[in-house]
Every structure is written in structure tokens, then in C-alpha cells.
Image (cartoon, helix red, strand yellow):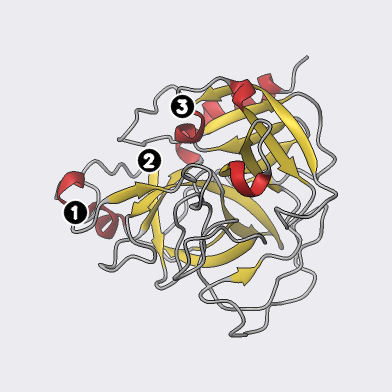
Amino acid sequence: MSRLALPTKQRRMKARAASAIGPVLAVAAMPTAVGSATGRPVHPPRATGAIAHGTPAGAMPFVVALVAHGRAPGQGLQCGATVVAPTVVVTAAHCVANQSADAFDVVAGTVWLSRSGQQRVPVARSRAYPGWVANIDHGDVAVLTLARALPEPAVRLDLSRLRAGTRLTIAGWGLTAGSRQLSDRLLQTTLRVRRDGYCRRYDDVYRTSWDMCASDLPRDACDGDSGGPAFVRARGRLELAGVISWGSAHCPSRHGMPGFYSRLSGIRSWLEQTIAAAQRP
């Protein structure tokens, strides 16, 4: 089935305009506190009905917001991103496509978009994966170099090929289920990687080397979550294995459609070289 023939219009999960639509998730559990230096859990989550399909993310200092330069985070949010080195973050290529690097700032140091104490750093350079093509989205990844270092800890990369059934943790500041407003607080949810055959039912240009899909409805990623992390838990800590790319026009999907993610393992050589180059003076 062609992408254009899907039962619901697909969407990239980038925040739209100033008004409303931003990173979104959907789960139900208490915050999972995460050790700031290693991503190791401090205590396990406990079930609660406090948030519709969503979990407050607790401390994930390596998850940051990509915002329009000079705009307040709540109004200028564009996408999520992840700190992988003191001066380097990873996001989705479509989040920064056709715009200069100085159009963006990274906001870090808080799980709340509206509260004081945030650290705001301009983006100095951006480089998208050269194999990425708009509306195809293989390798939908960009590496951003910051104007100065963040004090936030960097997360490690997991560049192994994830198997079906692997649990992914995703995070962002987006719409909660049934809402058209940004979440002021960073949210997270956990999904499962689906089999490649299932993914191909919704994307006829799906490529196993670059792409993966995940779902656990009604939990999902939505508009504005683009560029945010898809973590796996390895060796007792969170490690970055993918980047949120695109999904159903409805959130959560009404037709069982999963969300789609860019595998970091598929662009390993380019990613490692680009992150290393981004840290050179």
C-alpha cells in the first residue's frame, strides 16, 4: 500500500506554528526518576491514572527542546532532541530542513517548558544525514553543533540492530491524548518495536536498515515529538537507539498504524564520524 493511500493522512511529528501542536506522548504511570549522569533509574514507575496515556518523565537531562530562535519555549517549540556530547545534539533531519542553523536554539536544564532556570544555547551548525530525502524519511537524522557546551550529561548511543519486541522509551513535550495543547512538562511512554512485515503494511518504502516502527496503542508519539529520542535500556541505563520521525495523522492512531523511527544503527558510520567532527574546534 502506498503512503498516499493510507487510511489516515500520515504526519511528521514536528510542532506546527506557534499555536498549539507540539511533542506528544500517551501513557499512564508515575514519573521515572533518572540519574542525571548515567540515565540509570532511581526508582521504578508506579501505575497511576493521573495523565491520559502519559507519564511525567522525571529527570531526563539529556532530552532537550529545539525551539525557534528568540521565541519562548512554549510557543516556539519545533522538535525534541537528545544530548550526545557537550556541544552536540541529535534530532530529525526534517526538523531543520531548509532553515539555517541560527534559526534554532536548544533549551535544556528543565522538564518544564514554562519555568525559569532553563539553559538556552544557540545552534551553530546543523548537518542532516546526506541520504535523507524529504517524504521518504530514510535516515531522518540531523546532528546539531551548539554555540557552547551544555552542562547536561550526554547519553550513550546504542548502535545495535533492535529486534521486534524490544521496548523503546520515547519522550517529548507534546499533545496529550484528546488535547490540542502542548504539555508543559516532559512526558514519556514505552512502546514495542514491531516486526518489519507489520511496518511495511503502512509504508511501502520501508527499509529495514534505516527504519523501524513501534506501537503499543493507545500510547503513541504525536505532532511535535519529531526529533526526540527512542531509548533502549541497556546495562541499567537509557541509551539512544533511534529518532522519532513520522506517524499517523491521528494520535493515537485509529487504524493500528505504528509510529516510525530512524534507526541509528543504519547510519552508524556517518553518525559516529559526524558527532566526532562536530566536537572539533
Q: Secondary structure at mark 1?
A: loop
Q: Secondary structure at mark 2?
A: loop
Q: Residues within 10 Å of mark 3 (few under 14, many from 20)?
A: some
Quarter where residue 255 is shown: bottom left
Q: Which of the labelled discs sits on residue 97, or is there none?
A: 3
Q: Position of residue 165 (x, y in %)?
A: 43, 66
Taking the spot 67% from the left edge, 61% from the top edge, the residue there is: 185
Q: What is the crowding at mark 1: few (fewer than 14 residues within 10 Å), some, or many (at least 20)? A: some
In the structure shown, which secondary structural element does the residue marked by tag 3 occupy? loop
Are the residues tagged 2 and 1 within 8 Å (C-beta)? no
Amino acid type, residue under disc 2 in the picture:
Ser
Look at discs 3 and 2 and give the one toward the viewer: 3
Dividing the picture into quarters, in which one does residue 189 lie?
Answer: bottom right
Residue contact at pointers 3 and 1, CB within 8 angstroms: no
| Residue labelled with disc 2 | 209
Vertical arrangement, residue 266 with respect to residue 256, above or below: above
| Residue farthest to the front, as pictured | 19
Which amino acid does the dot numbered 3 rest on? Ala
135, above or below 232, in the image: above
State the image coordinates of residue 8 (x, y, percent, origin top left): 23, 57
Which residue is found at the position 44% from the left and 70% from the top?
A: 178
Query: Residue 191: x, y in percent?
Result: 48, 66
- Kind of residue sitting beneath label 1: Leu
Q: Answer left or right for 158 relative to 16.
A: right
Of 93 and 14, nearer the camera is 14
The residue sitting at 58% across, 77% down in the picture is 51
First of labels 3, 1 by sequence position: 1
Can you identify the residue that label 1 sits on? Answer: 6
Percent coordinates x, y for residue 32 in the rendering: 71, 70
Instruction: Classify residue 214 as left or right of residue 159.
Output: left
